[in-house]
Amino acid sequence: MKDRIYIKDLKDNVGKEVTIAGWVDVRRDQGKMVFFDMRDMTGKVQCVALPSRAEVIGSTVSHNFMDTAKEIRPEWVLKIVGIVNKRPEKNVKAGVLNGEVELEITGIEILNKAETTPFQINESTSGINEDTRMKYKYLDLRTERMQKNIRMRHKIIKFIRDFLDKENFVEVETPILTKSTPEGARDYIVPSRLWQGKFYALPQSPQQYKQLLMAGGIERYFQIAKCMRDEDTRGDRQPEFTQLDLEMSFVEREDVIKLNEKLLINIVQTLYPEKKIQEIPFPRISHKEAMEKYGTDRPDFRKDKNDKNSLAFGWVVDFPFFERTDKSDNSQAEGEWTFTHNPFSRPKSEHMPLLMDKKDIGNILTSQYDVVLNGYEIGGGSIRNHEPEALQKVFEILGHKIEDIEKNFGHMLHAFKTGAPPHGGIAWGLDRLVMLLQGEVNIREVIAFPKTGEGKDLMMGSPAEVSEKQLKELGIKLSK
């Protein structure tokens, strides 16, 4: 829009006639004068329509803007021309954007009208029925709180990208259409039209691809990655979520922990200076000690849980590699043992003989490390098994048959036989980290278009049925 300026810049244009555009936030009709607040993505400003001004310039505009000013309602989209004036001293609002100025209207153009909204946009929607908010998510996103959440999420991601770029990391996008392999959670599967009867899977994480990138000599990889898991309803989990995923070659556990700790500290100190990290460097505790002392592997280290600006980071290390299989969970492997983290972790060096001999399995400790914040796990990773023989032993312990290991993970084993370097990495639950930094109660508050707890998109109406024609093209028949 020609000559438009942002509302945040009005204070730098006192005495000038300017053009702004945005939404009507609040409207107040006081007899002859009409006041309303205009809102764009940068802030708000009070506008005033004066009859005296309309009489002076009435001949130069296509219609009397006072009539238009009296007509407008909240959430109408307007283009406003006006003069930036300083407010009288008694009306100055200190500490508020544009608290010292107002816009005296000289012209109004209606760009779009709006029906009455199902909830107030100029108030926090945290107390509004969530199903209603999610059905009208585009309206919820207009609110000040949601705008802050989404914009701070952007700043965190940008900070991560800039930081890792300076640390010689390369951002690599890995495939969304991949292969279904038994890694823990249930896959979302996608039918192939060209290869009927065969299916792609959506990635639970980029775990295998990032290790293959290490075999490919990338050395330092990261990605802001979409992950999809077809899990049952569990708290505030989402069918699709976002990870900061990274992997590093020629490293030990200490190298990965040191880099991630530095990144987290820098995010807080730069973007959230009002918050205080309780302890630097982050404290460390073994999995055994965490369970004995706190009864959980994601302990809350806060000394004062009433201080909303207290951030108690910590590391939990030395996890058991294997645990007994939960036979009630169909997503688990069929053997006597399953993994606690993922099958690609490397045991601690002193426990490698136990893995190779498949002895004392329950006491094998892995190189896994989790980073926790205020009682939440916000990231987890490990040093990986880069030797094919060791990875083969893991799958054997998990109960996989030799032919199934080759079928499901042969590409990994073959890659590790071609000179793969030692490597390790981590994945952060980015939604959860942003949630905690923004002081929200669930991750849906920091995702632009989340699903419900039951995995539904109430705005788009998904999941939804597809046509018989689409099913026929895919060679699929639905059972009743």
Image (spheres, grey):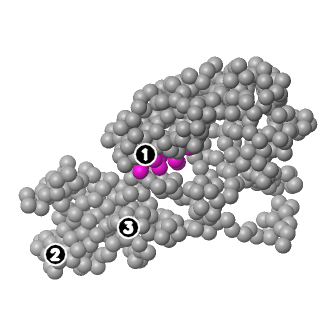
Q: Give the numbered dot on residue 121.
A: 3
In three-dimensional space, the C-alpha distance between marks 2 and 1, rounded to whole angstroms, equals: 43 Å
Q: Amino acid at mark 1?
A: Leu
In the image: residue 59, left or right of residue 472: left
The tag earlier along the polypeptide, 1 or 3, is 3
Near mark 3 (Cα within 10 A), the count class, few <14, some 14-19 or many ≥20, is some
Residue 367 appears in which quarter of the rendering?
Answer: top right
Q: Report the Cα–Cα distance between label 1 and label 3.
A: 23 Å
Q: Residues within 10 Å of mark 1 (few under 14, many from 20)?
A: many
Question: Could you say where residue 166 lies in the image, as x and y percent from the top left?
Answer: 48, 26
Range covered by the magenta-colored residues = 429-439
Q: Are marks 1 and 3 in contact (CB under 8 Å)?
A: no
Residue type at mark 3? Ile
The residue most toward the front is: 292
Q: Residue at x 82, y 37 (%)?
A: 398
Q: Give the image location of residue 404, x and y in percent.
A: 88, 39
Secondary structure under the numbered disc 3 in the rendered image? loop
> Does residue 352 sit above or below 19 in this rendering?
above
Residue that appears at 52% across and 53% down? 443
Q: CA distance from mark 2 to mark 3?
A: 24 Å
Badge nearest the viewer, 2 or 1: 1
Left or right of residue 230, residue 290 in this image:
left
Q: Quadrant of the C terminus?
A: bottom right
- Label 2, on which residue? 33
Comes first in the chain, label 2 or label 1: 2
Mark 2 or 3, which is nearer the eye?
Answer: 3
- The percent position of residue 152, horizontal first and vertical second, equals 41, 47
Q: Position of residue 92 (x, y in %)?
A: 13, 58
Q: Is residue 40 above or below residue 319?
A: below
Give the residue number, with chain letter if any, for mark 1.
437
